[in-house]
Image (cartoon, rainbow, N blue to C red):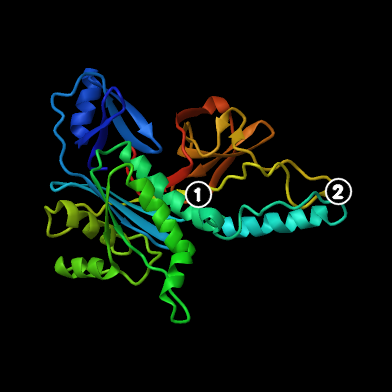
Amino acid sequence: MKFVPVVDQDQKPLMPTKPSRARRWIKEGKATPFWKCGVFCVRLNVDPSAREYQEVAVGIDPGSKREAFTVKSAAHTFLNIQTSTPYWVKDAMNTRRVMRFSRRAKTPCRQPRWNRTSGLSKGNLPPSTLARWQWKLRISKWLAKMFPISCFVIEDIKAHTYGGRKWNASFSPLQQGKRWLYSRLAKIAKVDLKQGWETKALRRLFGLKKSANKLAEIFDSHCVDSWVLSNSSVRGHRAPDNKAILFIEPLRFHRRQLHAICPGEGGLRRAYGGTRSMSLKRGSIVNHAKHGVCYIGGTMLGKVSLHSLASGKRVTQAAKLDEIRFLTFNSWRLHNETLP
């Protein structure tokens, strides 16, 4: 990162600083380094010399498989983020339903109760839709803990309507989901909505083009839109001054799946799921003596699995606890970022 997030003694975010200044503060004892879900930050041990804030806007470009966030002021682009969305919820719900039916096929069934996971009754969202909008809110809250955000600028996506009835868009899970998100973001900072054609006009104004490959890990795939959205609020640049991207992939945990779905030999199911590997929380970022910075996976026979932050692939299945130094709790993997 070109800038290091700064918080005061009460964990309130201040304006970011240069890495060189952060190192000097740490060396002089004026600040303490720490990690915030994989991002290196510093906490001041003394009162700040001033509490003057610039306007900081977060541009959000929502998507079905990839999304982008840009944190920007008039002077600097602090952070560009491209994230993957949690895509597995719908399939997991279908699998759960099938397994429940198979378990209850030959056993007495209790009185059915209202299905809390279906439809939009009483304003409820389907689990897969809710997970996607919760992910956007989670990233936004995480950024609000590191930067003094004054505004969220979001591309206001629309639901497709069918049969010529415009009113049926109000019943779409997409429409319900975005209203849910906007109401919660408004509690953090001001929310400014932009239409899709406005985002396109902003790209043309700055001479920028969006890539047709939506899954590419490049600035022009999604971050170009989040950058122009944030710049439309704080202004200050005619071209992107920082194209470095932090890529974030949510990790999937099987919290309540206490055993494997299919039984093994003798009809016994092996233990499966959980969120802890011995004394460590899964997903936590650690430093291994041989494999460097990794994150915690599963456990077997008193050993811990470690996975690469860049690819998610397992690098070892036999790490010992005394070879691991804990860095920070985490529930996503991030890469293409130089870690201090």
Instruction: Please name the residue that numbered disc 2 is placed on.
Output: 267
Above or below residue 234? Residue 339 is above
Instruction: Please say if 180 is above or below 283.
Output: below
Name the residue at 23% across, 40% down. 3
Mark 1 or mark 2, which is nearer to you? 2
- How many other residues sit within 10 Å of disc 2, few (<14), some (14-19) or many (≥20)? few
Residue 25: percent from the left, percent from the top? 21, 24
Residue 218 lies, in percent from the top left, at: 32, 60
Q: Residues within 10 Å of mark 1 (few under 14, many from 20)?
A: some
Whole-number angstrom distance, CA of label 1 to CA of label 2: 32 Å
- Whether residue 65 appears in this view of the structure is no
Judge left or right: residue 234 versus residue 138. left
Percent coordinates x, y for residue 298 in the rendering: 61, 40
* Left or right of 136, for residue 297: right
Q: Quadrant of the C terminus?
A: top left
Q: Which mark is residue 312?
A: 1
Nearest the viewer among 77 and 102 is: 102
Say which element carries label 2. Answer: helix
Q: Amino acid at mark 2?
A: Gly
| Residue 4, position as x, y percentages in the image | 25, 36
